[in-house]
Amino acid sequence: MRLSAYDHAPGEHCGSTSLRNLSNFYGWGHDEPTCFGLASGLGFTFFATEDPPERTFFGRPLWLEAAFFENLGIPHTHTEGADWAETWAAMKAALDGGDPVMVFTDIYHLDYYDTDTHFAPHSLLLVGYDETVPGREVTNADPDAGRGIVYCADSEFEDVQRLPLSSLAAAMSSKAAIPLSNRYLFVEGDPTVDRDAAAHDAIRETATYMLDPEDATRSVPEWGAHGVPGIRALAQDIADWTALADPHWTVRFAYQNIERRGTGGACFRTLYTGFLDEVGAEVGLVGFADEMYDIEGVWHRVADLLSEASETPEVFDLPGYLSKSSNLLSSLADREERFYRETLSTLQRP
């Protein structure tokens, strides 16, 4: 079966695209930047890894998808940790009931990506399945994954993709990047909170988290450096990347985490500019979209430096680029800190 009412469209970021497509499916009327902002979607996390690239970061919090439903008061089921048989039974029941299912995956196991890179959590929507079609055996899939295929609505693709059910089982339980444990989410009702009220709370949540992650209203991972302190940690660390095993790949991966890999550009700041442009006046933040647009521009400059650095032939060519990048990142941390402080101050005014 396949949900005939679902109309797929690609987008900038996996989470906010899936939310936008759910918004279209259920008639809530939010575009992708608005979904991103309503999900308290802006963030920053910098951390080290054991294998190359050894240093990485991303510009969104892990709570993005769930926060959208909570901020808008949308009844939903959001769970993880069950075994595959229980997980698939619950997801199949939701699909049979006419509801798309959001799942969280490692793209390494999504056959249609054809990649040898682990990257998680990547969210997408299941919009159908067919258990009569033989699936392909995957050696690290759950042995109880069963036969059949699922239909995946993925932000990176124009059309809905077919995926063996065994591959989905492997993708939802991968431990190679950020550990996954059969996490999924589906909608059970319509919003109960007004959009502008939800936007006000979401913006306050983002600003609070970025200034002091320990004050965040949602759980922040114990690993890594988060928020503005995370940007400062990156700025301090990046100058030493020449000592890493493969500094050119580390630098290239950093560029991609700003401009590519589903960020929407500028380490997700482009999406947030669009959100503030849409709701800023309604929540009393007139002109704040312009300031975020300028911040976005500095992130583009950092990305340009890192892209150029990654294409230099020798390691000894890197220090100049990394030093300039460090200086720009330090200025970004200062500027973003001022932005979030002014945001909270303005929201608190009567």
Image (cartoon, grey):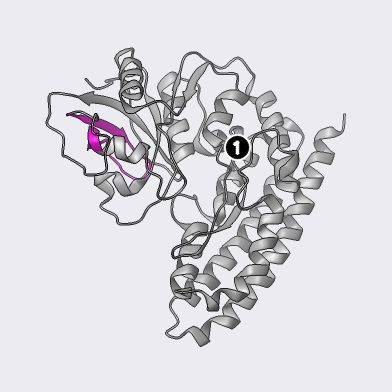
Residue count near mark 1 (Cα–Cα under 10 Å), binned few <14, some 14–19, many ≥20:
many
Expressed as whole percent of the image width and height from the top left, the position of residue 322 reads 59, 76
Name the residue: 72% across, 54% down. Answer: 336
Outermost residue, right side: 350
Instruction: Report whether residue 207 is seen.
Output: no
Q: Which residue is mark 1?
A: 37
Expressed as whole percent of the image width and height from the top left, the position of residue 259 reads 49, 58
Task: Identify which amino acid the numbered label 1 is placed on.
Answer: Gly
Instruction: Report whether residue 105 is seen.
Output: yes
Determine which quarter of the picture holds residue 231: bottom right
Which span is picked out in magenta? Answer: 147-166
Q: In screen coordinates, is 232 left or right of 186?
A: right
Q: In screen coordinates, is 222 left or right of 86?
A: right
User: Does the magenta segment cover residue 157?
Assistant: yes
Name the residue: 66% across, 56% down. Answer: 230
Q: On the rendered image, what quadrant is the N terminus found in? A: top left
Expressed as whole percent of the image width and height from the top left, the position of residue 41 reads 59, 40
Q: Is residue 100 above or below residue 141?
A: above
Name the residue: 63% across, 46% down. Answer: 222
Determine which quarter of the picture holds residue 285: top right
Q: Is residue 143 above or below residue 237?
A: above
